[in-house]
Amino acid sequence: MLPRMPRQARVAPGGLVYLVLNRAVARLPLLQKPEDYGAFERVLVEAHLGHPMRIPAYCLMPNHWHLVLYPRADGQLTAFVRWLTHTHTVRRHAHYHTTGTGHLYQGRFKSFPVQTDEHFLMSVLLCRAKRAAGEPRRAGRGLALVQPVAATVPRFRRPQGPVRLAGRSAAKLAADRQPAAK
């Protein structure tokens, strides 16, 4: 039998904005009642306290969530989301007395570097678009939150000035925003 190869380390350089998501295994409900949403938000705040992260927006849905994250340093994204998902899993299993029954999440979180201003805007507004399309209602739950974290927790701060996106540099973003010379 061949030895198992370790999985490749995730490459997530700091200074870029990412759309991050994770889904419950087998499309099972991850957040079943309003208190579950509050519990996840408390874990999100604790994750921020232990692994400071800029969080422009997030969206919680019954069987998955989306976070828009803006790490400052290399490796910060992975450390933050690993702590968040692990802690949420342990606490949820303890609350529902399901410890030892299997995985809560499908697998490792997915992260996508935000490429353009339009991608950033769409990432932030993703839940509103999904809710308008009726996705949470089709899931039979109807509770979805779109919340800029800076409005809820004073410790979170929105990025000042242009953010660095994977597709364009901050200088290019600033130049694009200048009115054209006549």
Image (cartoon, rainbow, N blue to C red):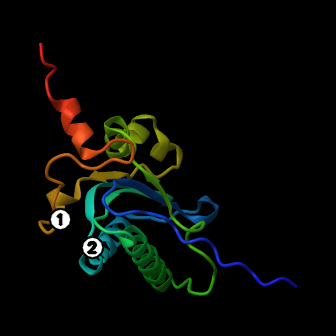
For residue 83, above or below residue 38: below
Nearest the eye: 112 or 61: 112
Q: Residue furthest right?
A: 1
Task: Decide if residue 62 is in sight here.
Answer: no
Secondary structure under the numbered disc 1 in the rendered image: loop
Question: Could you say where residue 92 lies in the image, as x and y percent from the top left?
Answer: 46, 78
Question: Could you say where residue 171 lies in the image, as x and y percent from the top left?
Answer: 22, 42
For residue 101, above or below residue 159: below
Secondary structure under the numbered disc 2 in the rendered image: helix
**Gap between marks 2 and 1, in whole Å?**
8 Å
Circle number at residue 156: 1
Label 1 neighbourhood size at 10 Å, few (<14), some (14-19), many (20+)? Answer: some
Q: Quadrant of residue 95?
A: bottom left
Nearest the eye: 94 or 157: 157
For residue 120, above or below residue 152: above
Which residue in the protein does label 2 denote? 48
Which one is earlier in the sequence, the residue at label 2 or at label 1? 2
Which part of the image, by quadrant, shows the N terminus?
A: bottom right
Q: Are marks 2 and 1 in contact (CB under 8 Å)?
A: yes
